[in-house]
Amino acid sequence: SEPLAKLHEGKATCADCHGSSKKISVDDSEKGVNKNCVGCHGTLAEMGKKSQEEVNPHKSHLGDINCTACHHGHTASWAYCLSCHPFDMKIAGGGATPTKATPVAKTKKHAEKADVVVIGAGAAGFTAAITAHDAGAKVVIIEKQPITGGNSMLAAGGMNAAETTFQKEKGIADSVDLMYKDTMTGGGDQNDPALAMVLAKNSAGSVAWLTGLGADLSDVGRMGGASVNRTHRPKGGAAVGAHITEVLRRNAAQRSIDIRVNSKVVQILEDKKGRVTGVRVAGKHSGEYTINAKAVIIAAGGFSANPERVAYYRPEYKGMTTSNQPGATGDGIDLGTAVGGDLKDMKEIQIHPTVAAGSRTLITEAVRGNGAILVNHEGKRFVNELTTRDKASAAILAQKGQSAYLIFDDGVRKSLKQIDGYFHLNLVQQGATLKDLAAAIKVPAETLEATVASYNKGVDQKNDAEFKRPDLPRALRTAKYYAIEVKPGVHYTMGGLKITTGSEVVAKDGKTIAGLFAAGEGTGGVHGKNRLGGNSISQTITFGRIAGDNAAKFAKNA
Ligand code: MEZ
């Protein structure tokens, strides 16, 4: 079909979309065009109220995003949701596949100035930017995707932290040392101990920092490999990522932090002494330009959505689905190595045990944390559901069909708001009784009933004799009963740029690279061989704060 500009002919003029100036210019974030879309059609929220579709593209977990993330004027439109979901979604002026980004002109030479440039607008990037701003730095965030939020936006289960006020209110006895120990054990003791200690020690402070910005992290649940409940998320068990992204976006906007989407950093600049001096940016419309900066923070995430790179490091994961957003391709890591940054643990790639079969939708570990069990196609349990992800994934891959069913009841469903989303996406099968559920998923009914009865007995006796599951929060006795077929998928890359406890990037000679900092998934060492669920958001906030603070100090003294 025709692109939107053509469809607008006779209804709107060029100036209606682009403004009335004689020379049409579009900023890379397309703020002007978006303002004009909203002027005629209404805000995203208003559009959301008007839409009648079962899956409402204007009311999604992506939150308040630009119209132009999906609606393109002069090339075919494409719904951003389709990057991950197989929806049968029509869009005016739409094409079958995403439009390839138009190559930007390389001629533009203008240069700008900032104290700190942050590469990437996920939680680590936002956190670093807000912290650096609050320490007095002039900050610019550069994001290559058309929307902000990165992978953090998709984070589901929660944020790990020890010794928080929320734990204390609930009578949960936890300690920094226990969180450190769990993190090290989960990582096969391959973690950099100093980085793991920074994570644990600062975790409560990071929860307090986010809460101070307006986040709700009052619900505390359990993830695999944790000795106690320490995974913080919004009340009712809502997904943590969409919530904190909204909070971080709002705080960045209140501070007028300069955020540029559709803008890719193509090079980190350095002087003859190897000191970082800024970045070269390719903007969707403005072409290439330079931002001279005293410090640069790489917060551009991992590479789980880069199948070639995943297969390079781990050939056995070739062809596996991923739970990640399409921008998680490892560019930040490349930018760091291009200026001499060393790498750590690149082969350590986490597969998450429960991605809905045939999809890219992560079924949060919190479903198991709140009581769900895993059964195979024979209707039998086969693993401690709260073991670490590497072990749970390996156990599923050893089952027939390399998949399993996550089984839960209405009690679990009501305990965790996120589960409603899986119904909305038609990922759940159900039965009024376990027998009905067994028929729906084609497993032997008697075996499934016996499995659940035996599990429930273990819950009553507070002892899972068969698999030694450490936490048995509730028996599965409340009809209806539900099942989601799950398979492991590439979820997280533990490896990345080598950093100090101060988030400085370390070069191959062991010295730090002056002016270069990194935080979040693009760094290596915090998690060792295997990251514990809930430690990712914890890492992004803690190391984002450290990077922001130290970059601002560095810029001040430069
Ligand atoms: O930290 C994670 O990756 C996480 C909590 C994922 C999840 O299952 O929700």
Image (cartoon, grey):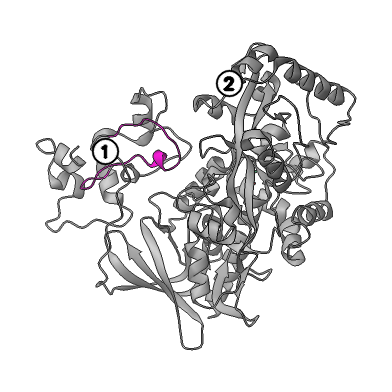
Q: Position of residue 220 (x, y in %)?
A: 72, 38
**Magenta part, dominant SS:** loop
Q: Which mark is residue 429?
A: 2
The secondary structure type at the circle numbered 1 is loop
| Residue 354 in the image: above or below residue 187 | above
User: What is the quadrant of residue 550 in the picture?
Assistant: bottom right
User: Residue at 88% across / 28% down in the picture?
Assistant: 462
Q: Nearer the viewer, residue 81 or 261?
A: 81
Sooner in the amino-acid sequence: mark 1 or mark 2: 1
Quarter of the image with the N terminus in it: top left
Are the residues flagged by discs 1 and 2 in contact, CB closer than 8 Å? no
User: Residue at 79% across / 29% down in the picture?
Assistant: 473
> On the rendered structure, is 396 left or right of 137?
right
> On the rendered structure, is 231 left or right of 333?
right
User: What is the quadrant of residue 197 in the picture?
Assistant: bottom right
> What type is the residue that disc 1 sits on?
Gly
- Which segment is the magenta one? 72-91
Q: Position of residue 543 (x, y in %)?
A: 63, 61
> What type is the residue that disc 2 sits on?
Gln
Image-quarter location of ligand 1: top right
| Residue 50 in the image: above or below residue 486 | above
Q: Position of residue 373 (x, y in %)?
A: 72, 29
What residue does disc 1 label?
94
